[in-house]
């Protein structure tokens, strides 16, 4: 089937089995490897992307479900060569060790800040609770999200 959607601000159309997970279409067909395969069951968050500004697990989402929608991956977060405040804050706080969970963490945090521009520490913890970091950088991740929220001052 032909599937068309907006990917990182640009229209994409491709012939693909509509039942294929969006994760594999992004990584294999479109060469966007920032979205990671973790558990394959939607538990770890490594494969998180935004679908119409909502954080979703791309390992569970069939590509046909993205049809006519907007998909944002970590590759599309920076604009005009400038890192997004979340990306800058993750670097500044050393909130990435191996970096495997980082794209999913950042996109989940992006959705969180879009819904709540000034979250409390507890709200950040709850909002990122289902994204796993095996390196144990959770404290630095929370601090990075707080820093980005302050920099964004509510504007996305």
Image: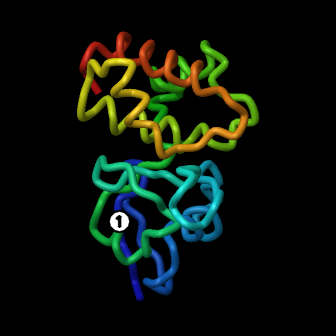
Q: Residue at x 59, y 43 (%)?
A: 132
Q: Nearer the viewer, residue 125 or 109?
A: 125
Q: Secondary structure at mark 1?
A: strand
Q: Residue at x 40, y 83 (%)?
A: 2
Residue 67 x/y as whole percent: 32, 72
Q: Quadrant of residue 68?
A: bottom left
Looking at the image, is 107 positioned above or below residue 22? above
Q: Nearer the viewer, residue 22 or 10?
A: 22
Quadrant in the picture for the N terminus: bottom left
Quadrant in the picture for the C terminus: top left
Q: Is residue 50 left or right of residue 153?
A: right
Residue at the farthest right position:
98
Residue 54 x/y as whole percent: 31, 49
Q: Quadrant of residue 154?
A: top left
Residue denoted by label 1 = 5
Q: Residue at x 32, y 29 (%)?
A: 113
Residue 119 x/y as whole percent: 30, 22
């Amino acid at each position: 089937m032909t599937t068309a959607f907006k990917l990182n601000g640009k229209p994409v159309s491709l012939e693909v089995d509509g039942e294929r997970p969006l994760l594999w279409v992004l990584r294999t067909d479109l060469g966007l490897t920032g979205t990671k395969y973790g558990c394959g069951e939607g538990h770890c968050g490594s494969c998180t992307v935004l679908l119409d500004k909502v954080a979703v697990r791309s390992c569970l989402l069939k590509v046909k479900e993205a049809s006519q929608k907007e998909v944002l991956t970590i590759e599309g977060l920076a604009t005009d060569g400038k890192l997004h405040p979340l990306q800058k804050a993750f670097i500044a706080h050393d909130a990435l060790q191996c970096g495997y969970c980082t794209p999913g963490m950042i996109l989940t945090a992006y959705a969180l800040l879009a819904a709540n521009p000034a979250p409390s520490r507890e709200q950040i913890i709850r909002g990122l609770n289902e994204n796993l970091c095996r390196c144990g950088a959770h404290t630095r991740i929370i601090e990075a999200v707080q820093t980005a929220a302050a920099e964004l001052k509510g504007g996305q």
